[in-house]
Amino acid sequence: MLHIEINEEGAVHDPWVISGPKELRDAALAAVKEWKYSKDGPLPASSEVTLAFQLPKKD
């Protein structure tokens, strides 16, 4: 689980980890920094988000 801040341009900045496995924290932070939110909503904003990681299935 992460806390994110969304600026006036819809970009995520200053995310931080609330909880989750230490091994996945850097990957989660890198992922949310790539997110862009629509400027149609009220910005700036903040939110808490949960990311779920899943290993690929082996065929």
Image: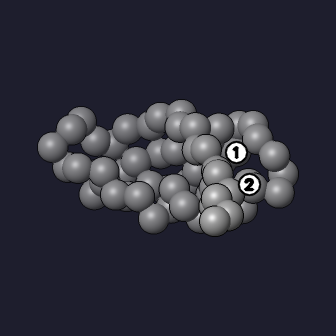
Specify the quadrant of the image occupied by residue 2.
Answer: top right
Q: Nearer the viewer, mark 2 or mark 1?
A: 2
- Of residues 34 and 44, which is closer to you in this image? 34
Which residue lies at the image location 44% right of the left edge and 55% below the top edge? 12
- Secondary structure under the numbered disc 1 in the rendered image: strand
Disc 2 crowd, CA 10 A, few/some/many (<14, 14-19, 20+): some
- Of residues 23 and 18, which is closer to you in this image? 23
- Secondary structure under the numbered disc 2 in the rendered image: helix
Residue positioned most to the front: 59
Mark 1 belongs to which amino acid? Val
| Image spot of residue 11 (x, y percent) | 37, 58
Which residue lies at the image location 24% right of the left edge and 36% below the top edge? 42
Q: Is residue 32 left or right of residue 41?
A: right
Disc 2 designates what residue? 25
Mark 2 belongs to which amino acid? Arg
Tell me the distance, in whole angstroms, between the alpha carbons under discs 2 and 1.
7 Å
| Image spot of residue 16 (x, y percent) | 65, 47
Q: Is residue 5 left or right of residue 23?
A: left
Residue positioned most to the right: 22
The answer to whether marks 2 and 1 mark residues whose Cβ atoms lie closer than 8 Å is yes
| Image spot of residue 40 (x, y percent) | 15, 43
Figure quadrant of the N terminus: top right
Which residue lies at the image location 75% right of the left edge and 55% below the top edge? 24
Which residue lies at the image location 33% right of the left edge and 43% below the top edge? 44
Q: Is residue 55 visible?
A: yes
Disc 1 designates what residue? 17
Mark number, residue 50: none
Figure quadrant of the C terminus: bottom right
| Image spot of residue 45 (x, y percent) | 37, 38
